[in-house]
Image (cartoon, grey):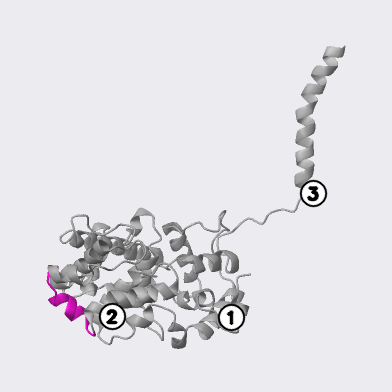
Amino acid sequence: MKNLSLQESEKSSPQKENERIASRQAHSPKKVSWQKPSYDPAISCFLEEIYAECNRSERLELDPLAIVRRYEKPEDMEVAGLLCSTLAFGSVELIMQACEKALKPLGEHPAKALREMRRNEIEHAWAFFQYRFCFPKDMIALMSAIHEALDSYGSLEALFLKCDTLSRQNTGKDPGDSAANEQKTHKGKTETDWQENILAASSTFVLKLHELALKAQPEGLRKNLLPDPCKGSAAKRLFLFLRWMIRHDEIDPGCWNSISPARLIVPMDTHMIRTCTERLRFLPRRKSAGTMASLRDALSVTEAFRLYAPEDPVKYDFALTRPGIDPRPGDERFSCL
């Protein structure tokens, strides 16, 4: 009888433990699971308010785009834009210093100056440049790639449009009148289709620049300096460059006129990640505060912003990141806390 009682006790022990767990779960507060974003009038009001308040030229003071804005010609803006966006990592003050230093050898007309440079002159101009993990050989490779692009295609825009055409052909999309097609996204083409097109074109653009860089540097261009978004990277700096080139408002110069801003993808920096997780709830909370954004995050956030600005999903990018990058009095009401 004693042995039987012991066996019954052993059998009942797991049952009692399960009952205790069930009891704790019943009395503990339930976690609210993250849900895919849907249109919210309150969020719409918030986005328009912060856009009106922060999307102003006076907020450009601490942004590398201010350097790009100094140039008047589109060909100079795109060269300066690709250079400055590629260096846009780290504190904004150091980014600005690095951009100024990198552009100094090109003078007032970067495109013309770079186009006329010989290979040995490019090597000499950036022989001592270094910013964090961007070493002289990386800068020489980047500038050589841009030089080759200007020489072969005439402009970076022409190269990107060539890459866009190739990506459309490879995915079976019509490479014809892109501007006309993009205005008819509701007629047989979804917004996601066009988003995938700009992603494929962006990837082809990056791969082409890496190919051109190999002509000057045997090691080519460092992959994490200009990553391929189709490999899973959020490619923040690449999508930042495209935002500058394609959008046109008080902030973005929009010197490329052949691509619709509806096709852009949101650049995901730490400030945008925090805003999209804590304030807008466009993304689920992250297990670690330092978790890097992925391409999936960028695409998900872009789709969420399409609910509020379908023709311009990157519209709120600059405004939403200002309170974190360059806080001003009154920005407290836009805090994520």
Position of 216 compared to 333: left or right?
left
Q: Position of residue 43 (x, y in %)?
A: 58, 74
Which residue in the rendered view is the most extreme toward the front?
A: 128
Magenta stretch: helix, strand or loop mostly? helix
Q: Quadrant of residue 237?
A: bottom left
Pinpoint residue 280: horizontal percent, then vertical percent: 57, 68
Q: Does residue 58 appear in the picture of this structure? A: yes
Give the residue drawn at x 49%, y 70%. 305
Residue 89 drawn above or below residue 217: below
Q: On the rendered image, what quadrant is the N terminus found in?
A: top right
Where is mark 3, residue-wise? 27
- Label located before the other in sequence (3 or 2): 3
Mark with earlier residue (1, 3): 3
Tell me the crowding category of disc 1: few under 14, some 14 to 19, or many 20 or more residues within 10 angstroms, Cα based: some
Front residue of 249/166: it is 249
Q: Which residues are magenta?
A: 108-119
Q: Do the numbered discs 1 and 3 sit on residues whose CB atoms are within 8 Å?
A: no
Q: Quadrant of residue 11?
A: top right
Q: Amino acid at mark 3?
A: His
Which residue is disc 2 drawn over? Answer: 77
Residue topped by disc 1: 331
Q: Residues within 10 Å of mark 3 (few under 14, many from 20)?
A: few
Q: Residues within 10 Å of mark 2 (few under 14, many from 20)?
A: many
- Tell me if residue 70 is in the magenta stretch: no
From the viewer's perspective, tell me whether residue 196 is left or right of residue 108.
right
- Residue 7: x and y in percent read 80, 18
- The three-letter code of the residue at mark 2 reads Met
Label 3, label 2: how far apart the Cα atoms are:
60 Å
Spatial CA distance of label 1 from label 2 is 30 Å
Q: Nearer the viewer, mark 1 or mark 3?
A: 1
Residue 57 picture quarter = bottom left
Q: Position of residue 202 (x, y in %)?
A: 30, 64
